């Protein structure tokens, strides 16, 4: 009886431990104003610039506002989008549909991180489980921007070629 107890105890502990290591869903932060705040005025300004660019140009589809946010020489590191402001506008012009500009980013925003001339937006990203297409899971998508002279001059994300 004692020899049977140890394997059962081990299996029980293993089950409990594996459930503790299971992925927790990524959750959006509803407090956008708090994420936009900060002690450094330049960083706060940069965070607001990127936030408003996302709301107005990307989510709102108002590509006519791209020159308000993007430098002409904008550098794009996403392999699917051309570099330069003109390339950005041409690419997203084929996809974007103009909508009412909302007061907040609609995508599930996790964090806004700013330091110096860099701003990162982190979003909840839902995917389909490749092992079970009936199940979904969440992960995080990051977009990083570099700001210079009040304009976005560079962008990175984790996109791969399509």
Image (tube, grey):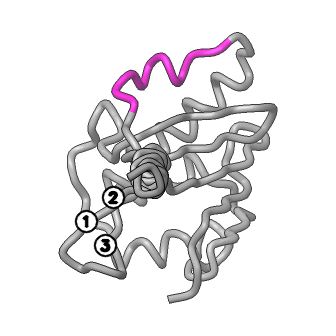
Q: Residue at x 61, y 63 (%)?
A: 157
Q: Is residue 19 visible?
A: no
Residue 128's label in the rendered image is 3
Q: Residue at x 78, y 43 (%)?
A: 148
Q: Secondary structure at mark 3?
A: strand
Q: Is residue 36 magenta?
A: yes
Is the residue under label 1 in contact with that under label 2 (CB below 8 Å)? yes
Q: Earlier in the sequence, mark 2 or mark 1?
A: 2
Q: Residues within 10 Å of mark 1 (few under 14, many from 20)?
A: few
From the image, state whether disc 2 or disc 3 is nearer to you.
3
Q: Earlier in the sequence, mark 2 or mark 3?
A: 2
Q: Quadrant of residue 138?
A: bottom left
Q: Quadrant of residue 26?
A: top left
Q: Which residue is mark 2?
A: 61
Residue 116's label in the rendered image is none
Q: Is residue 69 above or below residue 34?
A: below
Q: CA distance from mark 2 to mark 3?
A: 27 Å
| 80 or 124: nearer the viewer | 124
Q: Is residue 156 above or below residue 79?
A: above
Q: Residue at x 73, y 54 (%)?
A: 153
- What span is colored magenta in the figure? 29-38
Q: Is residue 92 visible?
A: yes
Q: Which residue is mark 1?
A: 97
Q: Residue at x 74, y 23 (%)?
A: 42
Q: Is residue 82 left or right of residue 18?
A: right
């Amino acid at each position: 009886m004692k020899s049977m107890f140890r394997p059962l105890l081990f299996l029980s502990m293993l089950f409990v431990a594996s459930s503790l290591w299971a992925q927790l869903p990524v959750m959006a932060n509803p407090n956008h104003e708090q994420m936009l705040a900060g002690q450094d005025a330049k960083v706060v300004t940069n965070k607001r610039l990127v936030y408003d660019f996302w709301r107005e140009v990307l989510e709102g589809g108002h590509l006519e506002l791209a020159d308000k946010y993007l430098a002409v020489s904008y550098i794009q590191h996403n392999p699917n989008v051309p570099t330069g402001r003109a390339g950005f506008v041409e690419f997203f012009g084929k996809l974007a549909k103009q909508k009412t500009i909302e007061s907040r980013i609609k995508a599930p925003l996790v964090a806004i991180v700013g330091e110096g001339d860099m701003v990162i937006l982190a979003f909840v990203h839902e995917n389909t489980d490749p092992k079970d297409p009936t199940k979904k899971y969440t992960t995080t998508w990051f977009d990083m921007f570099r700001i210079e002279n009040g304009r976005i001059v560079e962008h990175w994300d984790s996109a791969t070629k399509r």
